[in-house]
């Protein structure tokens, strides 16, 4: 059986990163699956607390299982969809994901002071591993905003100045004390993207120093809006998983708006959504080719 841990290890050995894309509707899952099948690569599908409430926890697990059974190779390489309970703040919701066979759970205590973040994340790791020893648990250190939106300015409280970014020594302590399998640091990234400008540049030397300090897979959140050269440098410095959400949400909305403009009286969703799916597929394919050096 394919495991998320093994796929991360393969990515690290190749010096590439896996792509992580969030979904809130079947059209987003279709776009991700279509591109993953076309490129014949593994992809991580993320669902936040709000997205899981909308789609359903057992429902999203069943959808991915069906796609993996139909198109994937359970004992080899190529296409496979892994499932992450993204940005989970409520321990009960984290445990629900573990019980339903999610491959990963991100327990997000990044908005709390370091000591509190460590205590909460350690408790989450213990409870989740007791439910499913094979589930990977990701922790977050440093606040990078909480919403996948189009911004006019940096979200209030987001760690963006050098003194507020994740320190390698704090990352090492966090990993040692919590026992997380993966770490999402604040390295200049923010959730969402700016309307009329690229996102802030990443602190690449900091990523490299954190990777050397923790020796576990690093996750880059807030990937939407980051320039390509920063992605390439960040992956070379130690990032193994990159999250993209706002970009495909924006592509979905653009496609729906264009189709409704072209056919204002259309009522059938299956006739309206193909344009949005094509727009999302363009974003997803571009990102996967960059992250995986395809």
Image (cartoon, rainbow, N blue to C red):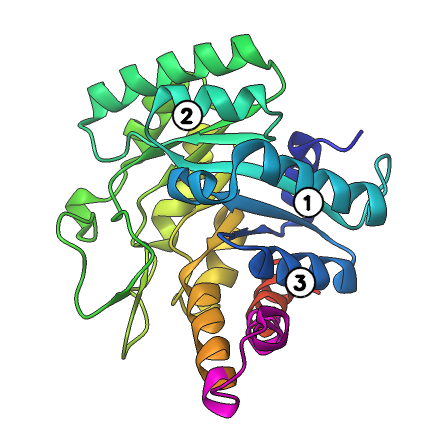
Residue, disc 3: 293
Residue 39: % across, % down = 76, 62
Please tell me whether mark 2 sits on a helix, a strand or a loop: helix
The quadrant the N terminus occupies is: top right
Q: Earlier in the sequence, mark 3 or mark 1?
A: 1
Please tell me whether mark 3 sits on a helix, a strand or a loop: loop
Please tell me whether mark 1 sits on a helix, a strand or a loop: strand
Residue, disc 2: 93
For disc 3, the neighbor class at 10 Å (few under 14, some 14 to 19, many from 20) is: few
The residue under the point 13% across, 52% down is 156
Residue 288: % across, % down = 62, 62
The answer for how far apart the CA atoms under marks 2 and 1 are is: 21 Å
Q: Which mark is residue 193?
A: none
The answer for how far apart the CA atoms under marks 2 and 3 are is: 35 Å
For disc 2, the neighbor class at 10 Å (few under 14, some 14 to 19, many from 20) is: some
| Residue 186 visible within the image | yes
The answer for how far apart the CA atoms under marks 3 and 1 are is: 19 Å
Residue 8: % across, % down = 63, 38
The quadrant the C terminus occupies is: bottom right
Disc 2 to disc 3: CB gap under 8 Å: no
Asked where in the image residue 133 lies, by quadrant, the reply is: top right
Residue, disc 1: 81
Q: Which residues are magenta?
A: 260-281
Disc 3 to disc 1: CB gap under 8 Å: no
Residue 282 painted magenta: no
Q: Is residue 7 left or right of residue 139?
A: right
């Amino acid at each position: 059986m394919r495991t998320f841990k093994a796929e991360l290890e393969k990515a690290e050995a190749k010096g590439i990163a896996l792509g992580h894309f969030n979904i809130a509707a079947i059209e987003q899952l279709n776009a991700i699956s279509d591109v993953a099948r076309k490129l014949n690569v593994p992809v991580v599908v993320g669902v936040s607390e709000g997205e899981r409430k909308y789609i359903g926890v057992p429902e999203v697990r069943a959808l991915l299982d069906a796609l993996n059974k139909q198109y994937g190779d359970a004992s080899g390489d190529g296409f496979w969809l892994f499932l992450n309970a993204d940005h989970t703040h409520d321990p009960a919701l984290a445990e629900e994901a573990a019980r339903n066979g999610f491959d990963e759970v991100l327990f997000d205590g990044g908005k709390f002071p370091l000591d509190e973040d460590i205590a909460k994340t350690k408790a989450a790791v213990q409870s989740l591993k007791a439910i499913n020893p094979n589930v990977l648990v990701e922790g977050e250190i440093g606040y990078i905003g909480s919403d996948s939106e189009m911004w006019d300015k940096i979200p209030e409280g987001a760690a963006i100045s050098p003194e507020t970014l994740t320190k390698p020594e704090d990352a090492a302590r966090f990993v040692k004390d919590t026992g997380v399998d993966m770490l999402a640091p604040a390295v200049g990234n923010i959730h969402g993207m700016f309307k009329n400008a690229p996102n802030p540049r990443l602190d690449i030397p900091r990523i490299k120093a954190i990777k050397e300090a923790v020796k576990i897979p690093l996750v880059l959140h807030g990937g939407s809006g980051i320039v390509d050269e920063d992605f390439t440098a960040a992956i070379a410095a130690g990032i193994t998983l990159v999250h993209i959400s706002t970009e495909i949400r924006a592509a979905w909305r653009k496609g729906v708006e264009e189709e409704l403009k072209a056919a204002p009286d259309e009522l059938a969703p299956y006739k309206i959504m193909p344009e949005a799916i094509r727009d999302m597929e363009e974003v997803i394919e571009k990102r996967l080719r960059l992250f995986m050096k395809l």
